[in-house]
Image (tube, helix red, strand yellow):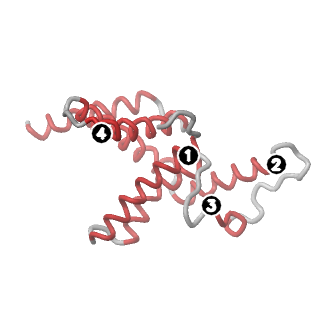
């Protein structure tokens, strides 16, 4: 994560990463477009909550949510409140919090584990990319208020998975 990135930029970057991965799966024939859209929905919801642009949605807020959150024009912050309400509604329409939270926790744990595995692998470029992905997911998780306990529990579970498979 470059210094000074906003949460909006981080969320948009994470969404773009998962969107590119979903499009690759579709191109390979591993997923249908509907499966890709379903798997991408949590990342769109997170991006909307963090103020980022969700392709195909945030450019048409007026059509999607025409009368929601109208504040008097002279009220300070009226435009920001309207945008926040619309982003919340979009996030809930794409993927409710109860569904995106475990996706983010799992992605966070997997990114942490991948960074741990690459630390001593002698591949500094891959390690740097893995750490950047982890930092972005960590920033999103903390911004969205996910409890550290949930994150750490998921990381420990992911780290122990190879042990359980071997047993």
* Vertical comparison of 140 with 33: above or below: above
Q: Nearer the viewer, residue 124 or 33?
A: 124
Q: Secondary structure at mark 3?
A: helix
- Callout in the foreground (3, 1): 1
- Residue located beneath label 1 in the image: 9
- The residue depicted at 53 percent of the width and 59 percent of the height is 94
- SS class, disc 4: helix
Tag in front: 1 or 4: 4
Q: Which residue is mark 4?
A: 125
Say whether disc 4 or disc 3 marks the residue closer to the N-terminus.
3
Q: Which mark is residue 58?
A: 3
Q: Alpha-carbon neighbours of circle 4 within 10 Å: few (<14), some, or many (≥20)?
A: few
Q: Which mark is residue 78?
A: 2
> On residue 22, which mark appears?
none
Q: CA distance from mark 1 to mark 2?
A: 23 Å
Whole-angstrom CA distance, mark 4 to mark 3, is: 34 Å
């Amino acid at each position: 994560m470059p210094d000074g990135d906003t949460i909006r930029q981080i969320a948009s970057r994470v969404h773009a990463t998962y969107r590119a991965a979903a499009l690759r799966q579709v191109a390979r024939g591993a997923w249908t477009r509907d499966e890709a859209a379903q798997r991408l929905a949590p990342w769109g919801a997170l991006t909307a909550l963090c103020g980022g642009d969700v392709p195909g949605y945030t450019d048409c807020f007026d059509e999607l949510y025409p009368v929601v959150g109208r504040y008097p024009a002279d009220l300070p912050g009226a435009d920001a409140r309207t945008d926040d309400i619309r982003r919340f509604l979009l996030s809930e329409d794409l993927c409710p919090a109860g569904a995106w939270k475990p996706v983010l926790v799992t992605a966070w744990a997997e990114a942490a584990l991948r960074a741990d595995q690459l630390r001593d692998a002698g591949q500094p470029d891959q390690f740097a990319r893995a750490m950047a992905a982890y930092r972005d997911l960590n920033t999103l998780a903390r911004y969205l208020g996910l409890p550290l306990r949930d994150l750490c529990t998921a990381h420990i579970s992911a780290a122990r998975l190879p042990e359980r498979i071997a047993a």
